Amino acid sequence: MRRWRNPLVYRLLVDLLTMEERHVIVTYRFDHATIQELCTQLEPDLMSPIRHPTGIPPDVHVLSVLHFLASGSFQTTVAMASGMSQPMFSNVLSRVLSALLKHVRRYIIFPQVEDLATVKGDFYALGHIPNVIGAIDGTHVALVPPHRSEQVYRNRKSYHSMNVQMVCLADQYISQVNAMFPGSVHDAYILRNSSIPDMMGQLHRHCVNSTGTGYPNLSWLLTPVRNPRTRAEERYNEAHGRTRRVIERTFGLLKARFRCLHMTGGSLFYSLKKVCDIIIACSILHNLALRRQVPFLQEDDPDDGVVAAVESVEPVEPVDSDEDEAEEEDNDNRDSVIQQYSQ
């Protein structure tokens, strides 16, 4: 005789409508209206193929995953708060990440030709350096490494991570992200094996501002002068510093808003593919928050033609990643910028 399994009963514990706006933003990082918009966008991919009264509603999918990404808590803790089991939440997390990544070209966009004038103007306001269309740097996201290649993921600060390359605009909007490479990989290697060189090669006389640490001095990549000898070079370095700080602020805001990416949230204990998906999903949500002008609040705060800008399909383990190659080279573009500070 066939035994029928007991139906899986979902106990609804989340009632968004009864929560104050500030508490919603603190818990989920978005306001009521933006959460509703996000649920509407993702609903077609989150609806169960078999609809029954014990299924988890799409809005609870979204709320539980937003809580998980924002808090950096364990799955069990978030699952209990959402009224589901840990295995159930694990499935929910995978489904929401998959649904979010389908919208990546809608939210992470490298500047298009028609946007360049505005983008350059915004960057010029930061440090008075002309023709800048992005600021680039890498940041580390801690993870539990696979046993077979543990050393590849150990970074220079002696913890395991993914080295994530990002480009941002002057308003901290993320315009490109590469989450493919382990923590031991040098920034120059990631840059050379990303889509950025090809994209910048098509944009003549435009440049990206870098931190300079570990980056080569290329015609389209502005780096600081290592040993300035003139007042013009010193003034250029000061302007360069004011311009590049936007990428540092972007990393800070991204990791503060989504604590799962911050060291205080612990190390991500997932497959490499899911770690990459989490990083990209948080980048999408970061841009959505900026687009909707959602303030960042914490508990203790007071009252197609789109350029592919994401690289994270499968994590890469390069054969040769020891790249201390950021030597000084002639750079007519940087020299022309420095020249304006001699006047």
Image (cartoon, rainbow, N blue to C red):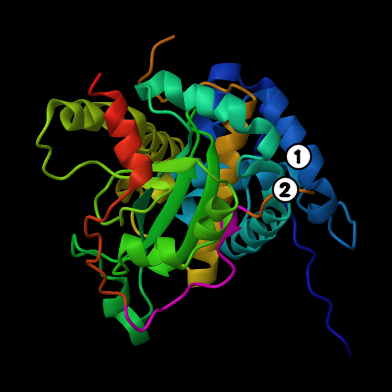
Q: Secondary structure at mark 2?
A: loop
User: Residue 49: x, y in percent?
Assistant: 88, 62
Quadrant assignment, res 113: top right
Give whichever of 153, 246 is nearer the camera: 246
* Nearer mark to the viewer, of 1 and 2: 2
Q: Is residue 73 visible?
A: no
Q: Residue at x 59, y 68 (%)?
A: 313
Q: Secondary structure at mark 1?
A: helix
User: Residue 2: x, y in percent?
Assistant: 87, 87
User: Residue 304: x, y in percent?
Assistant: 79, 49
Q: Is residue 150 visible?
A: yes
Relative side of 173 to 8, left or right: left
User: Residue lying furthest bottom in this view?
Assistant: 1
Question: In the rendered view of the protein, which quadrant contains the C terminus?
Answer: top left
Q: Is residue 15 above or below residue 260?
A: above
* Disc 1 residue type (three-letter): Cys
Residues shaded magenta: 309-320
Residue that mark 1 sits on: 39
Q: Main secondary structure of the magenta part?
A: loop
User: Residue 166: x, y in percent?
Assistant: 45, 49
Quadrant assignment, res 34: top right
Q: Residue at x 89, y 56 (%)?
A: 52
Q: Is residue 136 magenta?
A: no
Residue that mark 2 sits on: 306
Q: Residue at x 43, y 65 (%)?
A: 192
Residue count near mark 1 (Cα–Cα under 10 Å), binned few <14, some 14–19, many ≥20: some
* Disc 2 residue type (three-letter): Val
